[in-house]
Amino acid sequence: MSTTSTERTSTGAAGAGTPARKPATMAQALNTALRDALREDPAVHVLGEDVGTLGGVFRITDGLAAEFGDARCTDTPLAEAGILGTAVGMAMYGLRPVVEMQFDAFAYPAFEQLVSHVAKMRNRTRGRLPMPITVRVPYGGGIGGVEHHSDSSEAYYLHTPGLHVVTPATVADAYGLLRASIASDDPVIFLEPKRLYWSKADWSPDAPERVDALGRAAVRRSGTSATLITYGPSVPVCLEAAEAATAEGWDLEVVDLRSLVPFDDETVCASVRRTGRAVVVHESSGFGGAGAEIAARVTERCFHHLEAPVLRVAGFDIPYPPPMLERHHLPGVDRILDAVARLQWEDD
Amino acid sequence: MSTTSTERTSTGAAGAGTPARKPATMAQALNTALRDALREDPAVHVLGEDVGTLGGVFRITDGLAAEFGDARCTDTPLAEAGILGTAVGMAMYGLRPVVEMQFDAFAYPAFEQLVSHVAKMRNRTRGRLPMPITVRVPYGGGIGGVEHHSDSSEAYYLHTPGLHVVTPATVADAYGLLRASIASDDPVIFLEPKRLYWSKADWSPDAPERVDALGRAAVRRSGTSATLITYGPSVPVCLEAAEAATAEGWDLEVVDLRSLVPFDDETVCASVRRTGRAVVVHESSGFGGAGAEIAARVTERCFHHLEAPVLRVAGFDIPYPPPMLERHHLPGVDRILDAVARLQWEDD
Amino acid sequence: MTVLEQPGTTGHTPPPAWQPRTDPAPLLPDAEPFRLLGTPDSDGLDAGLLRTLYRHLVRGRRYNRQATALTKQGRLAVYPSSTGQEACEVAAALALEERDWLFPSYRDTLAVVARGVDPVEALTLLRGDWHTGYDPVEHRVAPLSTPLATQLPHAVGLAHAARLRGDDVVALAMVGDGGTSEGDFHEALNFAAVWQAPVVFLVQNNGFAISVPLDKQTAAPSLAHKAVGYGMPGRLVDGNDAAAVHSVLSDAVSRARSGGGPTLVEAVTYRIDAHTNADDATRYRTDEQVEQWLRHDPVALVERELRGRGLLDDDAAKAVADDAEAMAADLRERMNADPVLDPMDLFAHVYAEPTPQLREQAEQLRAELDAEAETDGEHGREAGAR
Amino acid sequence: MTVLEQPGTTGHTPPPAWQPRTDPAPLLPDAEPFRLLGTPDSDGLDAGLLRTLYRHLVRGRRYNRQATALTKQGRLAVYPSSTGQEACEVAAALALEERDWLFPSYRDTLAVVARGVDPVEALTLLRGDWHTGYDPVEHRVAPLSTPLATQLPHAVGLAHAARLRGDDVVALAMVGDGGTSEGDFHEALNFAAVWQAPVVFLVQNNGFAISVPLDKQTAAPSLAHKAVGYGMPGRLVDGNDAAAVHSVLSDAVSRARSGGGPTLVEAVTYRIDAHTNADDATRYRTDEQVEQWLRHDPVALVERELRGRGLLDDDAAKAVADDAEAMAADLRERMNADPVLDPMDLFAHVYAEPTPQLREQAEQLRAELDAEAETDGEHGREAGAR
Ligand SMILES: Cc1ncc(C[n+]2csc(CCOP(=O)(O)OP(=O)(O)O)c2C)c(N)n1
Ligand SMILES: Cc1ncc(C[n+]2csc(CCOP(=O)(O)OP(=O)(O)O)c2C)c(N)n1
Ligand SMILES: [Mg+2]
Ligand SMILES: [Mg+2]
């Protein structure tokens, strides 16, 4: 499984002139996004476990406490509900908290604050208490983490009205989407694919591409035979699969959703109507996963364009496996190609 | 919207002879199930907020503390994570805890214990620490509850491998499914449709129907035109819709899933293959809801039998509304019939 | 970092000197709940304050009674009465300055009203109308919190944010004895103490969490003793003595405002009514217990003080009662009018801008409502989904 | 329930007498951490116990070093070393009877090994092999808990269940200073005290939660002071003094066993190594601090005591060291063998019986594995998903 991604499509308007581009990791782009947000808006505050002096266990907040002080980048006590709960209060006072949950599974203690307050506060107060909170959650597997360190929890979030759910797959998007998330007046669950933290692409930290609005998917590879619909850590895997598929004579389109909520029905359906076939790919368990929603809505909207049912390639419906077995769980190129092969290419 | 249900189909083997049947509510059936389980198995312990002296805010545990003592039916401190967390420890010692969460939204504080321990303990210990825990959660709307009292949270649970997710729609099933859940060696999220607590049916408390195994759907009404796939509080609504549909010349089949995990693909697909059309109905928000999974898997399995895409009638993607607006949110007969009408009855 | 190779060769000296990080003694609550009314110390109490407390207490008592009556008339979905706890409710609101924030729990409608929120708007939630009726920002009153103790970290975050911005704003957060068992209580108090946030936590220990008595809730000497575990002072006060609660809260508020950090206050009181109108309290407690507490009534305590000092005569008492009656009459009348809700508002505030998905759903509802209206027009029947 | 109609007429008597529900004084920790080694009280210590502690400490120290080495060789995914904290680890295991249960946190591999679990099986999780390597029921050792503090309510529930069953079983649960901030810590201690469950909570205060020092974690006088808020005794002990920790824990265990209820023990110690092999501790702490603690080394403290009392000479020390070396060699060797996992086990223990859905998925994986095997056979290349 590839752990680096080369970006095929750059999105958003690049600055005038040609800013210097050099290899950067997704981690660096995220760090730059936080730094730029802290610089531009004094209301932005970063908080979480180990985000200050240490710079985060993944170093995404590296250097921020040194530059902006403890009050802008704060090491909190070890209590996720407390972190998110106090962030709610900070947002009520007009701040714009950016919260880090150290790992996917360690966001669960904050679930009540998230569902009952973060997601609902604007609605229950008829718009008087918006929640411009960004919750950064490193998620997903493929890094050999011990149990509770590799969960893909997006399905819990996308089913919670009031939240936006965003996940980058490229270095440029890591920056652009995180800035757009922090700028959003609504809460955003910003899911960072752990195994792409060290993926690299040419990128310009001085004039990084911005993303205008959340909710737009990107076609990462154009194709005609079928559409792979995916997001986050599975995007590079799908691109690899698409390359491999050319050997079988399939020309696959790859759509990177970038945002699960809002969902870009337009881009996705346009692609599927063109190709007539689709496979949804993600790491999290399939049953009740994001792929279920995607398959269902694509089918509702494109039924008569479909030559075959929309198929899903997802993690098994099991607790995330131990590192030594995770390769059997994660959707890989072969499993994706198997699904493509099942798209009823002959008449039946 | 009807709040009482008359049962059309009784399931499970009735006892020999004809035991006296008289009108009973779902609440009574649940209470009887708990009492019988406590009587038959000394390992069964009921715990939760107000379950003892008061008998629960819905009176489901009425009289149990008096009959079995505080140690078997225990009023706990007010802390849901603590309740479920201590139940995990009790299960580790061989007990069979039945936990009550007072309302749907008040189960969220226990989410971490549920996802990271209850669901995973058997798996992470290779079967050495099974978790025979039943978590009873009154769920859903339609009772005029203020905010945080009407959530439908089944999608969170069904996406969590290791859990069973069960929900009764009839008085007989309330008893049969709860007994089967308590008897299960695996954790069961037992979702009790609040607005059916006072629904009535003829039922025999002395020889109640048992359910042999979790995971079997029931056809509540046979029909030929299309299948309504539903569960819990929406079952009576679908039955009502099916009656109303006869006026339009539609003969609708109604499948009550009874269990979301395991899922009864066999019964559901057999029905859809026969009718060629399906609508999934549930109260919870549609986006990423149970209906997404159901629509996706039915489509995967029955694609060539489908005359139209599987449609979904669900709650809107909004926080649960205040009582005075809830009727606009809940799937009602009209909305179901509208969906049936969109099942492409003419050739297009 | 060094992994020790040869333990035997390492010297043996005492560990780096240990010392408690704060002196625990001043954090511990007094042995008895603090009281003012009926004690010699009551002489120093300001007459104006006593009169104000009295007026609010009488209004509060009347409000509880009126709201409970409204549930019987089907005008309120549910009402958790605070009868018997009015002293806490009123003192909490009056201890704050206008710029401060109040974080009420679901039972604290009286505190919300005493803070200046319209009595009808304070009931919007319990009426089944929109979740929060008042403007939280205008009044600096957070929404009534139904999920217990979840509002406490909000209070801490807000107070912390205010302090970071240089504003001398204090947050006062209310919670019940039952709510202290929740993890959110713990995390909020810990954050507050570590951040030295200007927050006051008021626990109304009314003896019960629905049916569960305090001794099934905690084994602590008192709830105020929990403070020491966070490194903040714990204060114990007679929760039926409005002057005492006001005094203790005011001290805690000034302390917080001047940078002294948070305080935990336990007010010992009693819930005279059932948990809500829907509850049957005879299932879990005796009438004797209730009678005992009725003899220590918060309204009577202040009234007696005022009368004893010649600050209240029958005419003045009647004026206060009349004022409360007028408030109740107004409440009754305005609650009798059916609120008009726009179903399309379901989609208005989920996000700043509705998502494309919500726009689609809003269109669906709009079409349904139009069809309903048309049918109503045709057949003259009640609008309503079946 | 009565709604008071005429407040003015109610009598004015003191409230029902208030009294603390327990006397707080005996619950408060001593002013200084309890110490035995190097104090006059150490004379009373049993020679056999000291020798046993010493042997386990040396083995523990060696184990930490070996495990850290294994991470460098890629044989362990990650290792959170407890070097510097061996006294707590060892004493926790030795304070228990066989029928008791241990609830370790993720750093507590040493305690698990000292309790008798095979040193390799204790590392299964950290090696990337199956999540829990040992049989928790056989050893009465819960799985190493990664989500912090979540194991504490499990310990309470298990101890409570044992008591209900009439078994005199005690549960000892371990947690770090950081873990005390979690809501689960609070809820567990509260349940334990209310239920008077036979549990002992051992907090290893090693000064840090990864990079976060104690003063950003709590403002409490000490972590042991948290106990009073639950109504249980708090004990403070020098966590590097194995005899003192063993003594305090043993007392707490006997107290629990005889129905005296739970105890909270704070052991003041220090993490000498970085958080894990992947951490760089120089980013957040000074070498001086580490040096200071190295001078109060838990292994050296016991060794000095033994030598001072003539209970250990060089030969005996060498025997102990050799035993530890042999354990390490065995560990090294057995950890060098690749574990053989069956991918089909992914489906074996999700439920007692796989669901039809899992059976389908298992068939899919089986088919993939078969195809892989075939391809491997044909082309002789490595099995593996791309
Ligand atoms: C998180 C949560 N769990 C459960 C409930 C249900 N509930 C509502 S009030 C109540 C009792 C509250 O007791 P206490 O905190 O003492 O406040 P009081 O009712 O006495 O004012 C319970 C259990 C809830 N609202 N929130
Ligand atoms: C619920 C939860 N949140 C966050 C983490 C990530 N994490 C692992 S160890 C650690 C620090 C733990 O500190 P402490 O409790 O003092 O134990 P120590 O590492 O010092 O042994 C953190 C934050 C976790 N494992 N679980
Ligand atoms: Mg109470
Ligand atoms: Mg620590």
Image (cartoon, coloured by chain):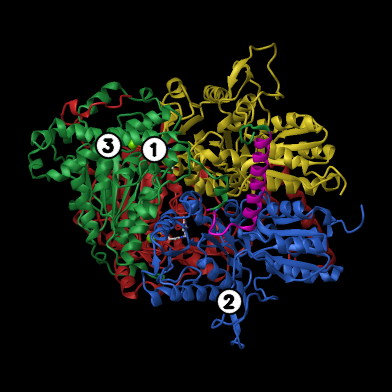
Chain colours: A yellow, B blue, C red, D green
Specify start and end residues of the magenta stretch as a single range. Answer: D349-378
Residue type beneath disc 2? Thr
* Residue D2, x across and y down, in percent: 40, 72
By secondary structure, the bulk of the magenta-drawn segment is best described as helix
Residue type beneath disc 1? Pro
Is any part of residue B236 visible from this angle?
Answer: yes
Nearer the camera: disc 3 or disc 2: 3
Disc 3 on helix, strand or loop? helix
Left or right, B216 with respect to D116, comes to: right
The verdict on label 2 being within 8 Å of ligand 1 is no
Q: Is residue D377 magenta?
A: yes
Cα–Cα gap, marks 1 and 2: 48 Å
| Chain containing mark 1 | A
Please say if A135 is above or below C202.
Answer: above
Neighbours of disc 2 within 10 Å: few (<14), some (14-19), many (20+) = many
Q: Residue at x 86, y 49 (%)?
A: A348
The residue carrying mark 2 is B25
User: Between D289 and D16, which is closer to the camera in this rendering?
Assistant: D289
* Residue A164, x across and y down, in percent: 62, 40
* Residue B297, x across and y down, in percent: 72, 53
Residue C62's tag is none
Residue type beneath disc 3? Arg
Neighbours of disc 1 within 10 Å: few (<14), some (14-19), many (20+) = many
Give the quadrant of ligand 3. bottom left
Residue D59's tag is 3
Q: Residue at x 30, y 29 (%)?
A: D272
Is any part of residue C373 visible from this angle?
Answer: no
